Amino acid sequence: MANITRQIWRYAPLGAAFAVLALGAAGMLMARETLAPEPSQAQAQVQAESSMPVSAQASMEEFLVERALMRETQMEQLQAIVDDERTQEDVRASAQRRMLELLDWMEQETTIEGVLRARGFAQAVATVHEDSANVLVETSALSQEDANAILELVTRETGLLGGNIKIIPLNSP
């Protein structure tokens, strides 16, 4: 992959910059689609997963690793765009904005996950995007009170409206 990327940069720096940005966006969209469908209501939607082939904890740990690897790859690609002397200034500025956006989302995810753990959810994973957020919590039952508290937290941290926030309870073993 690195050799291909170098060849692309050598012959088409502008095209490669947009391709890398598109690749990162496609990865984000794929990750979002695997978590939940697009929001369609003005309230957070709670989806119950009744039968899971693997434990909720293992699924969440796997997801955390995948998210970290995806974000690391995105940041490396964006940094390569920023560092390349042949990158046009508008593309460089766009890559820098995207990096700051990713860092902001990562901070919001960390805050949400930490607060949820402090509130008693042993396992919690949040993903934040430009116009949506997903929260996975390991729980035997998610009460309406808990769902409302999670919704309020995510809304406060991200500024998103409730219809763009998915709360996904995963059955604990």
Image (tube, rainbow, N blue to C red):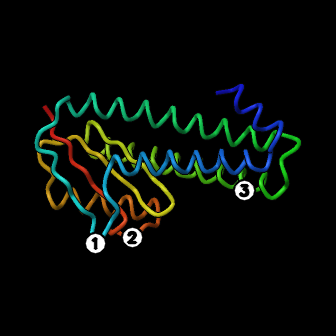
Instruction: Describe residue 155's horizontal placement relative to residue 82 as left or right.
Output: left
Amino acid type of the residue tagged 3 in the rendering? Ser
- Above or below, 55 relative to 129: above
Please provide percent x and percent y for residue 172: 16, 36
Q: Which mark is residue 41?
A: 1
Which residue shows up at 40% across the image and 50% down it?
A: 32
**Along the line of sight, the residue nearer the viewer: 42 or 114:** 42
Q: Which residue is mark 2?
A: 161
**Quick one: label 1 or label 2, which is nearer the N terminus?**
1
All told, the count of numbered labels is: 3
Q: Looking at the image, is 106 positioned above or below residue 90?
A: above
Residue at far right of view: 85
Q: What's under tag 1, amino acid-wise?
A: Gln
Q: Earlier in the sequence, mark 3 or mark 2?
A: 3
Mark 2 secondary-structure assignment: loop
Q: Quadrant of the N terminus?
A: top right
Find the distance from the CA under tag 1 to the CA under tag 2: 10 Å
Q: Residue at x 36, y 59 (%)?
A: 153
Place residue 173 in its image quadrant. Answer: top left
- Badge 2, how many Cα within 10 Å: few under 14, some, many 20+? some
Asked where in the image residue 51 lies, by quadrant, the reply is top left
| Residue 96 image point, x, y percent | 72, 51
For residue 110, side relative to residue 45 (left or right): right
Picture coordinates of residue 74, whole percent (x, y): 60, 40
The residue under label 3 is 94
Label 1 or label 3, whichever comes before in sequence order: 1
The quadrant holding residue 41 is bottom left
